[in-house]
Amino acid sequence: MACEEPLLTIAIPTFNSAHFLPDAVASIIRQGLDDFEILIVDNASEDNTEEVVRSFENPHIRYIRNPSNLGSCGNGNRCLANSRGRYIKFLCADDVLLDGVLRKQLNVLETRPEVALVTCNYLPTDSNLNIQGSWFAFPGSHPGRRVINLCLSRMANCIGGPSNIMFRRSASAGVVSDNKYRLLSDLKFGLQILERGAYVNIDEPGYLYRRHSGSDYVTNCPPETHVPEYLQLVCEYNWCNPLNCVVAFLSGGIEGRQFVGEHWLQACAPRRLAKSLLAFADFLYMRLRRFFGKRRVLQRGSTLIPQQKNLV
C-alpha cells in the first residue's frame, strides 16, 4: 500500500480517459521516486477506467470513483481533499511527465521553505505526442504578489495549468477550485496559493501537454468565455490598473470597453499605476527570456519525448 503520509501526492483527476492513463502513470513511475502516492480520482467515467487502473497492480496507486460526475472543479477539489502528501502535484490524465521533473520541483520545495508553488514550462503536442512548439511560464524566482500582479495586469496566465505546478499542501489549506470560472479556475487556484508564499519556475519543460478534441480545455472553455472571465477575476481581486484597462479596451470587445468605463478612475491611482509599470517590465523580461530560450528548448525537444515501448 502507499504510505499513509507520503512526501508527494501525484493526483490524476480523470473522466473517460482510460486510453491515456497508461502513458500518464508510466511517466510518473519513470521518475524513480520512492516516497509518493498516485491518487486517481475517477469522475464517474463511462469507459473502462477502473479496469485499466486495476491492471496496473501498483502499490503506490489509490483509486477513488465518484458516484456521480462532480464537474471538473469538483473532481479537482476531491483530489485535493484526499491527497495525503506533504507536497501535491496534479497531472491531467492526458498529459505525460518528462523525466526528472518531479525531483527538480521537489528539490525547490524541500530546500526553500518560503516557496509555496513551483512551476515548469511545457511542450504542446498533438494527440500522438508529436511536439508542436513550446510554452513558457514566467521565468525565475519571485515573491508571489509580483506574479499575481503580472497575471492580473496582463490578463494572462503566466503560471500554467494543473500539470505545470507543484505546491505545499499546507499552502493550499482552505483553497478550492472555483466553479464559477470555466477557463480560469486553475489560474485563480494558483493565485490563491501565491498569496501564501513565493513562486519558482524550474525554467525547463516538465511535461508533454497533449492537445486533442476531447480535452477539457476544448470542450469546456470556448473562446467567448475568455475575456469576461479575466475581467471578472480582475474585479474580484480589485486589481484594475492602466495596463489591464488597455488590454481590456483593445481585446475585450463590449465587455472590455464597459470595464474601462467603470474602472478607469480608480485604475489611475498612483499605486495602481506602479503595479501597471511593474507588470509591464515583468512582461518585457518574460518575452526576452522566451525569445532567447525558445530555440534551445525546441532543439532539445526530440530528446525529451519518453520511449513509447516502455510506457506501461
Image (tube, helix red, strand yellow):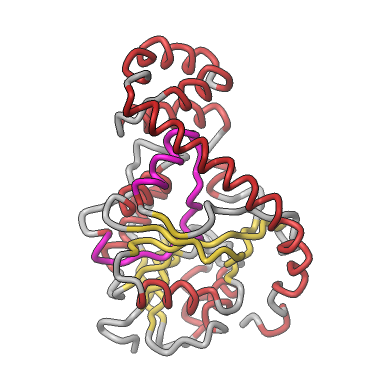
Q: Is residue 210 visible?
A: yes
In depth, the one of 271 and 216 nearer the eye is 271
Residue 201 highlighted magenta (yes or no): no
Q: Quadrant of the C terminus?
A: bottom right
Give the residue drawn at x 52%, y 66%.
202
Position of 212 relative to 112 (above/below):
above
- Quadrant assignment for the N terminus: bottom left
Q: Residue at x 34, y 86 (%)?
A: 2
Where residue 72 appears, x then y in whole percent? 41, 50
Q: Tell me if 185 is positioned left or right of 307 in this view.
A: left
Q: Is residue 163 visible?
A: no
Relative to 263, residue 33 above or below: below
Q: Position of residue 274 (x, y in %)?
A: 38, 31
Q: Is residue 115 above or below residue 53?
A: above
Name the residue located 48 percent from the left edge and 65 percent from the top edge: 91
Which residue is rendered at x = 31% and y = 59% of the image? 78
Say which of 178 and 166 sits in front. Answer: 166
Q: Is residue 61 left or right of residue 124?
A: left
Total number of numbered labels? Answer: 0
> Which residue of the protein is positioned furthest toward the left in this rendering?
174
Q: Position of residue 144 (x, y in %)?
A: 35, 52
Q: Is residue 306 above or below residue 94?
A: below
Between residues 208 and 43, which one lies in front from this camera angle?
208
Q: Nearer the viewer, residue 203 or 205?
A: 203
Residue 148 lies within the magenta run: yes
Q: Position of residue 113 (x, y in %)?
A: 30, 70
Residue 47 as seen in the image, left or right of residue 242: right
Q: Which residues are magenta?
A: 145-171
